[in-house]
Amino acid sequence: MNNINIILGPPGTGKTTELLNICQQKKELGVKWDKIGFFSFSRKAAYEAQDRARLKFQASKEDLVHFKTLHSFAYKHLPIADDNLMKSKHWKELSDLIGFNLVFNDDDSIYTNSNHKYINLINTARVKDVSLEEECRNSSEILNMVKLDYLDRVIKKYKKENNLFDFTDMIVDYTTDTFSTQFDVLFIDEAQDMPRIQYNMVDKLISHSKETYIAGDDDQAIFRWSGADVDRFIELKGNVTVLNKSYRCPKRVYRLANHIISKIRNRRPKIWEPKKEEGKLLRMADLKHIDISKGNWLLLGRTKKIRNEMIEDFLMQEGYWYGRGEHRPVSTTILNAIEIWQRLKQGVSITLPEVKALYKKIKSKEGLKHGAKTFKEEDEDKLFTLDDLKLYHGLLVDGDWWDVLSAITAFDVTYLRRLERIGEDIKGEPRIRVSTIHQAKGGECDNVVVLLDIGRLVYKAYRKNPDDEHRVFYVAVTRAKENLYIVEAQTYTGYTMFGDERTEI
């Protein structure tokens, strides 16, 4: 009989670390790598676990053969070739077929990341293992069932005719297949984010494994809107261990977090302790009242609209350099051209590829005369000075970068020049990061700013079912390692974080 162990990990308590420590114990007892399954909900989490395992165990990638996402594991054990995977090009073909522009991103989740509400609902119904009618009834969107059924039929027909499979198909097919891998030890990380169909697959894996460890935290389950089944996680039966020491959250953040999570009606009770530092918690009337000129910062908005219009616009207007994932406020090609030009002006020679990259950004009519046509094959390995370019390669200008380069708006010029004056480093990783709360899950930062605005549609859902929103803001505040700033809602659609003003935080 399978021994099922549930590990509850409040924020910063080290769920993945605990699973890897147990994995080490099993290895010391002689369990072989091919008998260990270690599965995470997202590709990002799976890669992180794999990288940490490599360092911890000095293991090769071949050793960690079963450190994967569930859908990648299913794909490996099913007769599905790469050509049979549903990819962006297929969604483009479907767009042309049905007359809708369907944008699909190959991301790390099981969900169809589409811009089309009908397609999102179809896939959400699939991962939740419910009918279209049921999902439509529960949706806040106003949808036409005739149109919904039509799209569902067209997608199914297209996939069948072209022998195509998406992530959801992989999970379902593995679950219903007679075959199952047998593990001595099975690890499931971030289980609170799994939808029902993944739980079905996990149930099958558990039934063929000797021992199972399932880690998660229902208080941090913030993806119910896209199919995650937090209630299933809460109902799991097994030996329960609570990781009770946070290495991230200071005392003030801990008290606020507990105040928020105490509002949830259905949850697993957990007692945990913060780190010894008191930390700082400040309520601010406006974002502009926070001094972010030094240190590392994470600024969180509830939605993309709030992130873009309230946070990013503020940072641009105030002249702060920041990052949003891989995105930067000014394109990399422009930044590279500026950097190349500045090196030239300082007397540094540049390579031919750098010259060509620079010339693409120079104001051609004013600053360049047939320059690109003057380079010959023998120049491939040559280095060029500013004088070389002016004498032999059509360069007509010798001014500052903002006078020389094109494709830079007046606003961007003002923005970049201010960054230069205040000494912001625009070459390395930005010290200021912006994100939605959902995208920041799993992250942390010394200084965290949380905006309480939530937007009209989210506010409507919040009033109907507040538990999910409590979880979202619980995740938001527990990203802070030292200082937490709460910015009051600028509109009437805001999250009520503090409630009873007498509550000690």
Image (spheres, grey):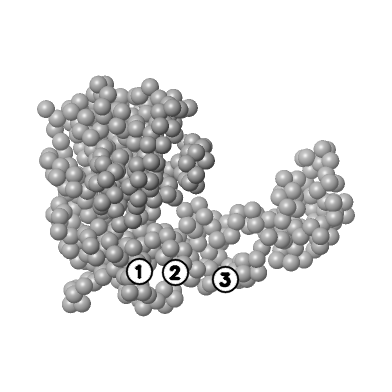
Decide which of tag 3 and tag 1 comes sooner along the chain: 3
The residue located at (20%, 77%) in the rendering is 501
Which residue is most to the front? 146
Mark 3 Cα-neighbour bin, 10 Å: few <14, some 14–19, many ≥20: few
Dot 2 lies on which element? helix
- Can the viewer see residue 428 in this picture? yes
Callout 2–callout 1 Cβ contact below 8 Å: yes
Gap between marks 2 and 3 measured at Cα: 23 Å
Callout 3–callout 1 Cβ contact below 8 Å: no
Name the quarter where the N terminus is drawn.
top left
Amino acid under label 2? Met
Amino acid under label 1? Asp
Gap between marks 2 and 1 measured at Cα: 9 Å
Question: Residue 104 vs residue 233: left or right?
Answer: right
Q: Which residue is mark 1?
A: 453
- Can the viewer see residue 66 in this picture? no
- Report the front residue among 352 and 100: 100
Identify the disc placed on residue 422: 3
- Give the x, y percent position of residue 45: 35, 43
Gap between marks 3 and 1 measured at Cα: 30 Å
Q: How many marks?
A: 3
Amino acid under label 3? Ile
